[in-house]
Image: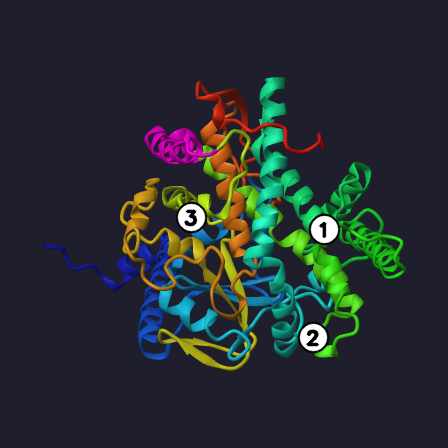
Amino acid sequence: MLCAISKEEFLFLVEKHYDVLIVALLFSIGVAFFVSKLAWRKATASSRGYIPGRLGLPFIGETVPFLSAVKSTGGCYEFIRLRRIRYGKWFKTRVFGKIHVFVPSTDGARMILSNDFVKFNKGYMKALLDCIGDKSLFTVSHENHKRIRDLLSDLFSMNSLSSFIEKFDKMLCQRLQKLEQDGKSFSVFDFSMKMAFDSMCCMLMSITDEALLRQLEKDITAVSNAIFSAPIMIPGTKYYKGIKARRRIMEIFKDMIARRRSGEEWPEPEDFLQSLLRRDSYHPDEKLQDSEIMDNLMTLLISGQATTSATQMWSVKFLDENQQVQDILRKEVLSIARSKPEGASVTLEDINRMPYCWKVLKETMRISSVVMWYPRVALADCTIEGFEIKKGWHVNVDAKCIHNDPELYPDPSKFNPSRFDELLKPYSFIPFASGPRTCLGINMAKMTMMVFLYRLTSAYSWTVDDLDTSLQENAHFPRLRSGCPITLKQANLPTTLFCSPLCPPT
């Protein structure tokens, strides 16, 4: 039992330990404030739709840590992962002066993606608008979006895709054969990027000249690098280089259109550009103006190249790590290859006979989530799953979070293509988005990737030459810094499985 002390003794103790008492008092006040603030957040979250997070200073917000994540080998999603640990699945932040809310659920994805143009719209950085143009499918109004999308959809008809796949397959065969014969290591990502670009240029504009292809590729890369840069027109900046590259690309397109209209150039068979020019005499609603043609040619060249190439890179990595999956896939493609005559191209019918190959790619897209989130802007105040969203806020459908939700995908880190044997919950698998803005080139991307895996696994074995899992810094999409370098070896298979040189060297 403590003994009573006199008033003088008490005052003496207070005076002697004054600094300790002050620190203890401030600490107690701080703890009480933190606890009360946490309790208030929980209460308001349940009663008034409060979204936790940190907005920081106006405009600056958390821009600095976001950029730090972008420039790291962990990738920009590390920024999101850390905040989700701190605040929970739903959280808000401020980046580049804009408030962003990350939406982690299928119900939220349905609400946002199915209401494109109605309750939500895409938000564009100035650099993106300047680089790809205001007539691009990405940036036009709702009315023009539908018209342009309808006219561009001819490119992705079954007849067009069948012709594209045949040309792509021939080009792929020739290049894989050369790489195997050379016996040198090559980056799957870089190889896929060049294949995608060259094949799209051939399909869109019948461009096969190597010098012109490399010039266009260099300029398209500069434009792509500038899309998310600061719009500062100073020599040496990404934005400056991108705008200069755009002007050069537009001049190439203008010259090509002029030569075709004058009859100086006439591709056989007809390519996509020629099919658009053939509509010159049509009603304005049934044709594209030259500015619309040029902006959307560049949009088509940029939009699918990196995402498809990154997915092919991840698929090779995952197959190398999962030999059993690779064996099942190889058995499927060999059953098709053995039934085809020597040197025959892959057809749409062949692709339809490869369900497991498509599951492998779906599982690759789920785990890698190359498009990590889909940004939209709220057009009015609204509520999503009880959370209040203000007009002008950016709402980001977090595809990576949805794709790795253990309630939707048990053991989500495991590479298991057979999980796609089961019917999925709506909006639980959104690598191509959904709703009115569903990726226009979804079927082309699917077929391109399936043909790539068909040729790779039916005719070759490979070794991955660099197992580093670090991500590329400053990349728009998550990809390995190494690009997944491999060395090809011809598999010990019947000769009918290999392609004959059906196309000239490129």
Task: Give the side of residue 127 with respect to residue 364, left or right.
Answer: right
Q: Identify the mark at residue 352; answer none if there is no mark.
A: 3
* Location of the N terminus (image quadrant): bottom left
- Which span of residues is magenta-colored? 318-340
Residue 406 against residue 286 in the figure, above or below = above
Instruction: State the SS at label 1.
Output: loop
Instruction: Give the residue drawn at x 49%, y 81%.
Output: 381
Task: State whether the magenta stretch is mostly helix, strand or loop.
Answer: helix
Which mark's residue is nearer the viewer, 3 or 1?
A: 1
**Circle 2 crowding by C-alpha within 10 Å: few under 14, some 14–19, many from 20:** some
Q: In the image shown, does 444 or 298 lie closer to the viewer? A: 444
**Which residue is denoted by mark 2 in the rendering?**
286
CB within 8 Å, label 2 to label 3: no
Q: Considering only order in the chain, which callout, 3 or 2, is on the residue closer to the N terminus?
A: 2
**Circle 1 crowding by C-alpha within 10 Å: few under 14, some 14–19, many from 20:** few
Instruction: State the SS at label 3.
Output: helix
Which mark's residue is nearer the viewer, 2 or 1?
A: 1
Q: Kindly indicate the quadrant of the structure image that contains residue 298.
A: bottom right
Residue 363 against residue 149 in the figure, above or below = above
Amino acid bearing label 2: Glu
Instruction: Give the residue drawn at x 60%, y 26%.
Output: 186
Instruction: Give the residue drawn at x 51%, y 19%.
Output: 489
Residue 329 sits inside the magenta stretch: yes
Q: Identify the mark at residue 154; answer none if there is no mark.
A: none
Task: Give the side of residue 257 with respect to residue 172, left or right.
Answer: right
**Which residue is denoted by mark 1 in the rendering?**
269
